[in-house]
């Protein structure tokens, strides 16, 4: 007798995300992705900043999760810090590998390098249009995010554009 194992929800969410990104009916048009910073380019370009978007959480959860593009990429660093202050962000969860940060948001990279980021920072790197290299570490990081939000923290979840990897990680939360 072969025993049927229940699929891991994290792996199911990743697989679903990948399948949907490869289909031609991906829900974001190329024009919208380009406007919000998608389209796969790694070059920093001036664009219209997308506002912080709240993630709908169960009513019993006292914290908040905000979805956004890379801090300082589509807005000035000072504008990002002001908005993060208004929303009382105490934790940033970064889904981009460290090498992607400097060319897209030099001020964010400088704050990380100098240790002057005014909130906690958690790195959960994922490949663009892909998965985390280490699913065990990624799962542990998502669990840390869940614990922080359950405890009442306000967290910002971001990748480069705030759409693909951000949505995938939000679904895993």
Image (spheres, rainbow, N blue to C red):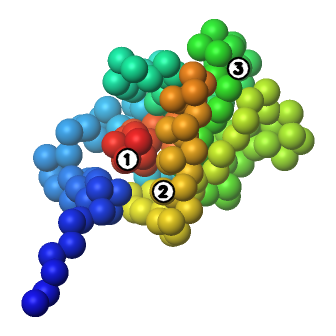
**Mark 1–mark 3 distance (CA, rounded to whole Å):** 26 Å
Tell me which residue sits at (37%, 47%) in the image: 172
Image coordinates for residue 109, horizontal then vertical, percent: 76, 43
Towards the viewer: 138 or 160: 138
Q: Residue furthest left?
A: 1
Residue displayed at 37% across by 25% down: 57
| Residue 49 percent coordinates (x, y) | 51, 23
Q: For the residue labelled by badge 2, is the local secondary structure a helix, a strand or a loop? A: helix
Which label lies toward us, 3 or 2? 2
Q: Are marks 3 and 2 in contact (CB under 8 Å)?
A: no
x, y (%) of residue 46? 57, 30
Point 13% across, 87% down: residue? 2
- In the image, which disc is placed on residue 44? none
Q: Which residue is mark 1?
A: 172
Q: Which residue is mark 3?
A: 81
Number of other residues with Cα within 10 Å of mark 1, as a class: few under 14, some 14 to 19, many 20 or more:
some
Near mark 3 (Cα within 10 A), the count class, few <14, some 14-19 or many ≥20, is some
Which quadrant holds residue 78?
Answer: top right
How many numbered circles are shown? 3
Label whose residue precedes the other's in the sequence (1 or 3): 3
Left or right, 11 with reference to 138: left
Q: Is residue 12 above or below residue 26?
A: below
């Amino acid at each position: 007798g072969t025993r049927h194992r229940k699929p891991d929800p994290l792996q199911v969410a990743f697989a679903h995300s990948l399948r949907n990104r490869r289909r031609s009916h991906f829900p974001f048009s190329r024009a919208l992705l380009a406007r919000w910073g998608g389209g796969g380019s790694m070059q920093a370009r001036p664009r219209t900043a997308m506002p912080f978007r709240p993630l709908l959480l169960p009513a019993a959860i006292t914290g908040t999760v905000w979805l956004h593009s890379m801090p300082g990429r589509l807005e000035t660093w000072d504008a990002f810090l002001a908005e993060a202050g208004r929303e009382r962000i105490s934790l940033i969860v970064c889904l981009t590998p460290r090498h992607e940060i400097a060319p897209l948001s030099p001020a964010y990279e400088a704050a990380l390098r100098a240790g002057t980021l005014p909130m906690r920072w958690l790195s959960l790197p994922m490949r663009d249009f892909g998965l985390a290299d280490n699913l065990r570490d990624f799962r542990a990081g998502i669990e840390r995010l869940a614990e922080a939000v359950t405890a009442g923290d306000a967290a910002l979840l971001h990748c480069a554009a705030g759409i693909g990897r951000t949505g995938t990680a939000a679904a895993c939360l």
